[in-house]
Structure formats: C-alpha cells, structure tokens
C-alpha cells in the first residue's frame, strides 16, 4: 500500500528559549521487506544552526538539531511517501511458552534485532508482579508464543478503555493499568510489561495509523495522531510479530513504522533540552492518505 504522509508538531513557549538541542525521530523508517521510504523530508522552523542526520542503535532515523539563538516557538514537519508491505499471516509455528528459554539460549548474536535487548527492565518498563500475574492468568505453559501474545493483547483491549484525556506522556504503565484507562502509549507499555514478565521479549513501535478506514469498517482509534503498538519475539522460526493492543489486531498495511525500541524513551518523537522558563503548548497534526 502506497501512502502520502504529512505531520506537523508545533511548540509555543511562555518565554523565549535561549538555545536548545533536540533529537527528532519523525521520519518513517526504511525496512527491507516491510516498508520502503520512497521519498521523505523533515523540516524545522526556525532553521537550526546545526543539523546531523544519523541512524541510531536500533536502526531508526534520527535528526539532531541545535539552536543557539533565542526563539519563542518551533515547528517540525515531515512530508513522506511510503510503500508499506503487509507481512503474510501464516500458520502458527511458534514454540510453546515452556520452550522459550531454550530458544533464547540458542541465540548468540547481540545485534539490535536480537531479543536479548527486550527481555528485562528498561526506562519506562518495570517487571511488576501485578503485570506478570495478569499475563499468567490468561496464558499457560503449553500455549504457543504467538497465541500468548494475541491473548494478552485481546484481554488488555477488553479490560482497558481508550481515553485520550486520561493520561499524559509522563503517566506510568502501572498508573494507566490500575485505572484501566489510557491511550495507545499506555496500552503498549502495559502489554510490553506483561509480555516481558512471562519471559517473552517485547518492544515498542511508534508510527502512523491509516486515517481513512476501509469501506464499511469503523474508524480505528489512534488515527489523526502518531500511534504506538507492540513488537513481540515469537521464536526463531517466526521471529518478530507486531500487535496493536489499542485496536486488538495484528499489524498490517494500515500501520506505518517510524521507529522501534525498548520503550517510548528510546524512540520519543522529540527529545532534547533548552534554556527557558514557564510552560509550553503543543499541537500535532497528522494526515495519512492511501494512494
């Protein structure tokens, strides 16, 4: 599926920011066999004094920008054309949960794609017994890894309520879980915590969700904004599988990947520091148009 994507994120500061440094992960990814970035451009206004484009450890596009002069607002925008290929849904040949330790022990590589990086705690993920108990209550050792991932995702979707006003970007997974309300970031962090708690490697994916639903279908929650979903390792034969717990479905052509990491802290769209005082307001607009 071919898409034209546009995104704008604006910030207005209560008082002028005297300089700043930002790391931007906003441009869609180019992933062999899954997604092709046909063309893409990321702009910042005002124009930064320095800019470096690079690839981070997990293979994500990053633009590092520096401001030395004072500025009262800033705007980031992208325009991209992406060709997204859906992974075929084949037979479930993933091993049972009880065989997962042996599968993991057989891996010797430490590159960024390997599950070893997605097993333990990370800055936004804690292995709390409450998450582990929740995951164990709906799975059993004889269940396949893929079935366990889908079962936990479906259960979370049933028990959680999507509520755009319930949480902020600082809300912890446990706070959202205990309140049973949240947005895609909360659903994703909770599911990752549950999966890692029972030993399944899991990571965070940021991206876009198609804004125009297929004919006769309801509009998916998370459209018209950046979206997030889960990436889970289902054994050597299947490898990584992506699941959207906010909408209770396997990820396909409607999900466009921006970045992948252990949790939100690895792939936050805009991260940085600046010298200022007072608060700020921000606005985000996203348009994903299937061609």
Image: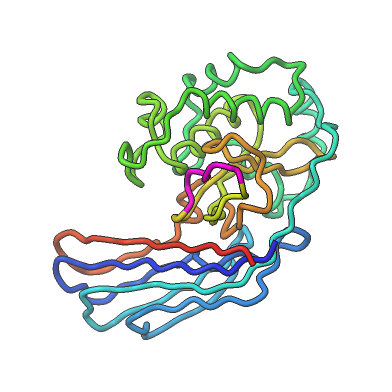
Q: Residue at x 64, y 25 (%)?
A: 151
Q: Is residue 44 left or right of residue 61?
A: left
Compared with residue 187, is residue 287 higher up or lower down, i.e. above or below?
Answer: below
Q: Where is residue 201 in the image (x, y as percent from the top left)?
A: 65, 37
Q: What stretch is highlighted in magenta?
A: 216-223
Give the colour scheme shown: rainbow
Name the residue at 50% across, 65% down.
26
Task: Assess whether residue 22 is covered by the magenta stretch.
Answer: no
For this rendering, which residue is in front, 274 or 250? 250
Q: Residue furthest front?
A: 216
Q: Quadrant of the N terminus?
A: bottom right
Q: Where does the C terminus fall, quadrant-wise?
A: bottom right
Instruction: Give the main secondary structure of the magenta stretch.
Output: loop
Q: Nearer the viewer, residue 233 or 246?
A: 246
Q: In the rendered structure, does residue 217 fall within the stretch colored magenta?
A: yes
Above or below: residue 47 compared with residue 158: below
Tell me the quarter of the picture where residue 138 sits: top right
């Amino acid at each position: 599926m071919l898409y034209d994507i546009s995104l704008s994120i604006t910030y207005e500061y209560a008082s002028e920011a005297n300089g700043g440094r930002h790391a931007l992960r906003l441009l869609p990814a180019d992933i062999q066999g899954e997604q092709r970035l046909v063309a893409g451009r990321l702009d910042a206004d005002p124009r930064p004094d320095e800019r470096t484009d690079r690839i981070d450890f997990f293979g994500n596009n990053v633009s590092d920008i520096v401001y030395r002069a004072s500025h009262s607002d800033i705007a980031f925008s992208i325009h991209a054309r992406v060709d997204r290929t859906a992974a075929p849904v084949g037979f479930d040949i993933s091993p049972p949960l009880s065989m997962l330790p042996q599968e993991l022990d057989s891996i010797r590589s430490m590159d960024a794609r390997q599950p070893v990086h997605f097993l333990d705690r990370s800055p936004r993920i804690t292995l709390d017994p409450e998450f582990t108990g929740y995951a164990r209550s709906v799975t059993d050792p004889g269940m396949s890894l893929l079935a366990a991932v889908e079962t936990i995702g479906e259960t979370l979707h049933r028990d959680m309520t999507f509520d755009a006003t319930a949480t902020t970007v600082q809300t912890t997974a446990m706070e959202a879980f205990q309140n049973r309300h949240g947005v895609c970031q909360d659903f994703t962090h909770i599911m990752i915590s549950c999966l890692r708690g029972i030993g399944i490697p899991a990571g965070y994916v940021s991206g876009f969700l198609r804004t125009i639903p297929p004919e006769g279908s309801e509009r998916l929650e998370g459209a018209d904004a950046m979206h997030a979903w889960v990436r889970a390792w289902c054994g050597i034969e299947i490898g990584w599988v992506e699941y959207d717990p906010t909408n209770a479905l396997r990820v396909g052509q409607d999900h466009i990947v921006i970045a992948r990491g252990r949790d939100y802290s690895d792939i936050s769209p805009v991260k940085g520091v600046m010298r200022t005082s007072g608060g700020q307001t921000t606005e985000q607009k996203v348009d994903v148009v299937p061609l």
